[in-house]
Amino acid sequence: MEILKGKGVVLEIDVTTAVATTTRGVEANFFPVVCLTENEFSMTHAEETTSNKCDGNWATSTSGLGSWTMTLSGQIMRLTTDEATTRKNSLVMKNLAKNGTIFYGRLTDVANSPEDYNEGKVRITDYSESFPLEGPATFSLTLTGIGEPFFAPVV
């Protein structure tokens, strides 16, 4: 048994594979987004109340539509031309947000990639940047899942 360290979990994106042609991204097309400081995966199901007079004093419900998000923040970095061929930065994410582009995103444990991940089709629904007087400029974004997410390893 081993504790998963957050430092090793990164966001990788595939903006090359056409989302209309497949349900998953293509391994060779995933690139890491650099200099993240924090990331989170969240999944919920809406609760649909089914309570009626026959249930006595207890509420009953059923699971409704599910949704999921990945929330991330990081430092704004400029990449050299060579670095930009193997990594993505906040500028790429800002343009994806501006255009409302649907693409593949996954949070993956780099030590076990591609065997350990949360992946799916996503769209950036929130993007912001902060420029403090002291300290690094930062960005934050929310990736909202489109359809069902995929997880590995499957246990």
Image (cartoon, helix red, strand yellow):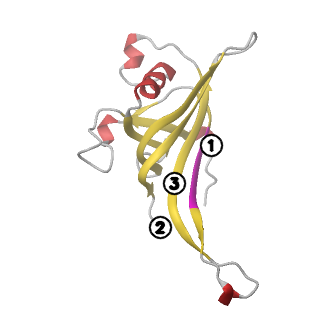
Which label's residue is closer to the chain start, 2 or 3? 3
Which quadrant, please, contains the N terminus? Answer: bottom right
**Which residue corresponds to the image point at 26% horizontal and 44% vertical from the top-left?**
20
Task: Please tell me whether mark 3 sits on a helix, a strand or a loop.
Answer: strand
Which residue corresponds to mark 2? 155
**Tag in front: 1 or 3:** 3
Which label's residue is closer to the chain start, 2 or 1? 1
Q: Depth check: 30 or 104 in front?
A: 104
What span is in magenta?
39-45
Which residue corresponds to mark 3? 67
Mark 2 residue type = Val
Q: Is residue 82 left or right of residue 130?
A: left
x and y percentages locating residue 68 in the rendered image = 52, 51
Q: Quadrant of residue 137?
A: top right
- Asked if the stretch drawn in magenta spans residue 33, the answer is no
Which residue corresponds to mark 1? 6
In the picture shown, does residue 73 fall above or below 54?
above
